[in-house]
């Protein structure tokens, strides 16, 4: 019993020594640590109060230390714990909300943003009609369309896709007409979008060197298809520039 | 000595508690804001619609792929998959023509595999549970002699939600030049 008491008293004295000079100048974090230590010891101290009353040498110092653990730690510890809990919840809830918002389903506003979806559909339909139609009598129209509607790697892709078609159409004095029949917006991500397009292509040759007067061309390099109409499908990537949607890539699915 | 010990004690007591209280209140404010933000994010109508759109698309793509895949060696499994991918009129049509079709495929000994190139939803009514999809498909048919042919299909599908699942209720190819080829 006496050894325990001596030990406790010694500890208390040491603590008092430590806390006193350090406390007024110490930053909040340092104080909290000291407080935490006293809080842990508290039960032993309160149980020991009656027993230590007969040790007058440490009495003066003991009084404030005894008052401190009894009143301060519970409130402060409670507040600290509450702060940590609330802060933790705030961080967690924020992370959850951000996680929900960054879900691919949400970042894609195709159909959820109806105005933008139909705007893109309309502009892509017009763009594809123009970009894949060619009149041998007016070759400048296609160049103009390419200049106005294409950007980035789509410029090269378009040139490659239509080089053959152009040559043949010039030789046969043909008029190639492309009409989009169906389109759907796959995804809209801010200023970028991808549209799936179904189109019909018909070609009318005015002086053909082939058997018929009519020849159809598939999309771009599928120009060897015979028939009045040819079915084409392609995916078009578009980007928004100055309020207009420009074609940035053409995907003919390897055909 | 007494006052030297007690004064800083009393002085320290209030600012500390006040500081802790202030921190707690700030943390509480953040927690309330973040919680509300989270609730809003979780109950966003647009998000629910977007999720339904993606569910319809993935189910539609899978169903269209299923209906263009058939192995003469595993006819039952293939045709069962057709049945489970469809609903309504299409389901009935397939069920009615099942035996006849199975005989044809058995005789031809073909293996068809389909790959979805791209797909998109054109219309979605998430209340009525109806959707319309475009699916660009590449079908590879392997004949009995091992010769493979690729064919691209422009599919138009209609989906109906039955028991929480999207199933194909109509399927056809996009007409070319105003006339249907499918």
Image (cartoon, grey):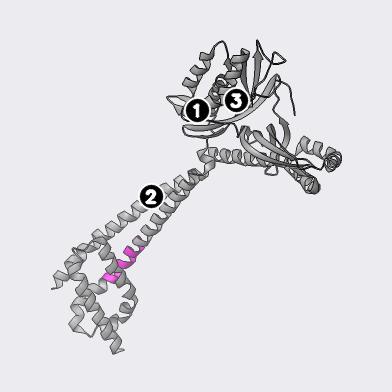
Specify whether B24 is left or right of A208.
Answer: left
Say if B166 sits above or below A244 in the image: below
* Viewer-side residue, A133 vs B41: A133
Q: Residue at x 55, y 25 (%)?
A: A124
Q: Are marks 2 and 3 in contact (CB under 8 Å)?
A: no
Q: Which residue is mark 2?
A: B30
Element on which disc 1 rests:
helix
Specify whether A4 is left or right of B174.
Answer: left
Q: Which residue is mark 3?
A: A220
The CA distance from mark 3 to mark 1 is 13 Å
Say if B105 sits above or below A70 in the image: above
Query: What's the mark number on residue A156?
Result: 1
Give the class, few, some or many, for how many residues have Cα within 10 Å of label 1's Cα (few <14, many ≥20): few
Task: Name the dominant secondary structure of the magenta segment.
Answer: helix
Q: Report the span colored magenta.
A: A68-79
Res. A120 visible in picture: no
Q: Earlier in the sequence, mark 3 or mark 1?
A: 1
The CA distance from mark 2 to mark 3 is 58 Å
């Amino acid at each position: 019993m006496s050894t325990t008491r001596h030990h406790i008293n010694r500890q208390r004295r040491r603590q008092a020594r430590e806390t006193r000079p350090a406390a007024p100048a110490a930053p909040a974090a340092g104080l909290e640590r000291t407080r935490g230590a006293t809080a842990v010891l508290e039960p032993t101290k309160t149980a020991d109060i009656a027993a230590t009353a007969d040790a007058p040498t440490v009495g003066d110092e003991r009084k404030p230390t005894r008052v401190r653990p009894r009143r301060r730690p519970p409130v402060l510890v409670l507040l600290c714990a509450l702060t940590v809990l609330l802060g933790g919840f705030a961080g967690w809830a924020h992370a959850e909300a951000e996680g929900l918002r960054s879900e691919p389903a949400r970042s894609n506003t195709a159909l959820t943003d109806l105005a933008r979806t139909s705007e893109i559909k309309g502009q892509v339909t017009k763009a594809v009609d123009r970009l894949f139609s060619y009149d041998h009598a007016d070759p400048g129209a296609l160049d103009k369309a390419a200049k106005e509607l294409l950007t980035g790697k789509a410029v090269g892709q378009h040139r490659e896709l239509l080089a053959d078609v152009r040559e043949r159409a010039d030789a046969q004095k043909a008029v190639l007409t492309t009409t989009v029949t169906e389109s759907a917006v796959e995804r809209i991500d801010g200023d970028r979008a991808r549209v799936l397009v179904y189109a019909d292509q018909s070609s009318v040759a005015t002086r053909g060197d082939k058997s018929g007067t009519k020849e159809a061309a598939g999309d771009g390099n599928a120009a060897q298809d015979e028939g009045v109409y040819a079915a084409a499908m392609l995916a078009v990537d578009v980007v928004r520039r100055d309020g207009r949607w420009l074609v940035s890539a053409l995907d003919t699915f390897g055909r | 000595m007494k006052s030297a010990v007690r004064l800083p004690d009393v002085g320290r007591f209030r600012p500390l508690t006040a500081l802790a209280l202030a921190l707690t209140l700030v943390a509480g404010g953040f927690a309330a804001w973040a919680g509300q933000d989270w609730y809003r994010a979780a109950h966003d109508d647009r998000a629910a619609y977007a999720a339904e759109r993606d569910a319809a698309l993935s189910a539609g793509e899978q169903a269209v792929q299923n209906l263009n895949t058939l192995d003469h060696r595993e006819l039952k499994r293939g045709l069962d998959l057709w049945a489970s991918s469809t609903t309504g009129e299409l389901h009935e049509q397939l069920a009615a023509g099942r035996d006849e079709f199975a005989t044809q495929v058995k005789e031809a000994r073909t293996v068809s595999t389909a790959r979805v190139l791209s797909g998109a939803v054109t219309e979605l009514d998430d209340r009525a549970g109806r959707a319309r999809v475009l699916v660009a498909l590449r079908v590879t048919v392997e004949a009995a002699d091992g010769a493979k042919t690729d064919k691209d299909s422009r599919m138009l599908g209609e989906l109906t939600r039955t028991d929480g699942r999207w199933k194909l209720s109509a399927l056809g190819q996009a007409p070319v030049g105003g006339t249907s080829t499918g």
